Image (tube, rainbow, N blue to C red):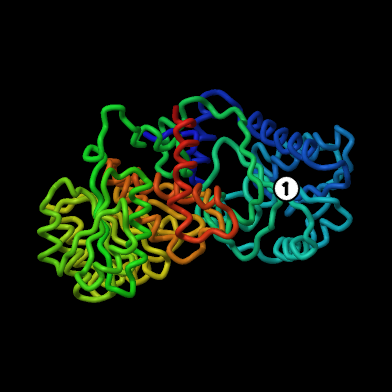
Amino acid sequence: MFDTRHALLTVDEMSRSDRLTIERGRPGIVLMENAGRIVAETVAARFPRGPVSVLCGPGNNGGDGFIAARLLRDWGWSVSLFLMGERERLTGDAAEAAHRWAGPIHPLTADAAAGAAFVVDGIFGAGLSRDVNGVAGELIRRVNEAKLRVVAIDVPTGLDGDTGEVRGVAFEAKLTITFFRKKPGHVLFPGRALCGEIVVGEIGTADGVLDEIVPTIFENAPAVWGEAFPRLRVDGHKYSRGHAVVVSGGPSTTGAARLAARGALRAGSGLVTVASPPNAVAINAAQLTAIMLKPFAGADSLTKLLEDKRKNACLIGPGAGIGPSTRENVLAALLSGAAMVLDADALTSFEEIPRDLFVAIKGYFAGPTVLTPHEGEFRRIFPNISGGKLARARAAAAESGAIVVLKGPDTVIAAPEGRAIVNSNAGPELATAGSGDVLGGIILGLLAQGVPAFEAAAIGVWLHGEAGRHFGPGLISEDLPDMLPAVLRELARTLG
């Protein structure tokens, strides 16, 4: 099991962790008091003292708000508390939290934030099951339009904690305070943008609850896959670090393959070969030095090239061209048993017959396969899969039998059996032509070194994000491979 410090808990899993904790002897009101105290202490530490509107809903999220309001008032803050619904209808721990609040309770109205320096949002938590509308919806719109600072408890009201999607309308928070573990909605867009800074507080959840829950979704981080990361060995040599093959397209589209090949080499593959159509050999030869070059002419020729089992990983797609010849090359490569990365044109070439691709991926001779679609490519080969990004990536992995890397600012890596990792370190500088080609190459280089496909995909996505972050504004795709040495040095220090 992965390092559970980076587990992302669904709404149901988080509720279960609370129930298990209560069953083991810690009362729910204690958890609520701890949550409310964390909110109050964070607010007091981050914001200058001023009038604050605390907005409470009818559930446990509102209970956390009552406790935060009580503590802030006790510490000398000017607090106005607004409740959605009737106090008499509160139940359980939320009712007890309201009982401990001795101040006035105002009905929640669209102008509840008027005159406040900032808002503490405890209306609805992550388990929202319907769109926000009516008075709460109008209040949210007014607060957002006024750009009033919002501190959200758990998630901003209106945000689905499992998908990161907006249910009707949602607060745009400056700070979100959640408890025990993040939820998928904290790191999936648009949720990630709406949460602002995220603080995770410990409220006293019982030890060992995650051993029972066995989470399957994680936020991408070195602690999650560190044991699988390939370390340099003193007795290693280029042949022990694998031999990656990148299949080039024709004369006018060779750059994508070279970008990928350089990414594979920088990611640690001992050898990298660009397999080039004969009419593109001269162009590729003029640009390559440490990367080798091998002509090939069609699927039969690629089959012969990959008969050398030292060539243990292959990437097809960047600049490959869309059509029957690319399909034939993909199917031939899958029969070789090499670990595969399929991207771009290799995916779109199967738009009309995706099942043929999936059958080949699941075939007896196929090696581990990673698919790296962006949203457009995903829709082409998985036209019948809908829903939130996380759910779609997991469904696609199950259908295809491959590791699916559904790219974007919140890239999701999903395995056929349901494991998933959400990446959160990618910045806007990566939105540049050729960036995805380099990512495919980085994953390829890790596969060549024997890293399991799921971990190779997660590591590759994280390295790609860090490389972009290290360079910053002005990045072009050619810069990414050359940022990897600095990233890898930092990673080596982190992993020890």
| Callout 1: SS | strand
Residue drawn at (40%, 66%) of the image: 386
Is 98 on the left-hand or right-hand side of 385?
A: right
Q: Nearer the viewer, residue 167 or 369?
A: 369
**Mark 1 lies on residue:** 151
Image coordinates of residue 445 in percent, x first then y, are: 32, 48
Residue 441, image quadrant: bottom left
Residue drawn at (58%, 55%) of the image: 191
Label 1: how many Cα within 10 Å (few below 14, some 14–19, many 20+) = many
Residue drawn at (32%, 62%) of the image: 257
Is residue 371 positioned above or below 58 on the image?
below
Q: Nearer the viewer, residue 305 or 439?
A: 305
Residue 401 at least partly seen: no
Is residue 490 positioned above or below 187 on the image?
above
Image coordinates of residue 47 in percent, x first then y, are: 81, 42
What amino acid does circle 1 point to? Val
Is 494 on the left-hand or right-hand side of 27?
A: left
Is 165 on the left-hand or right-hand side of 420?
A: right
Q: Nearer the viewer, residue 392 or 100?
A: 392
| Image quarter of the N terminus | top left
Residue 429, image quadrant: bottom right
Image coordinates of residue 273 in percent, x first then y, are: 24, 54
Q: How many marks?
A: 1
Residue 206 at least partly seen: yes
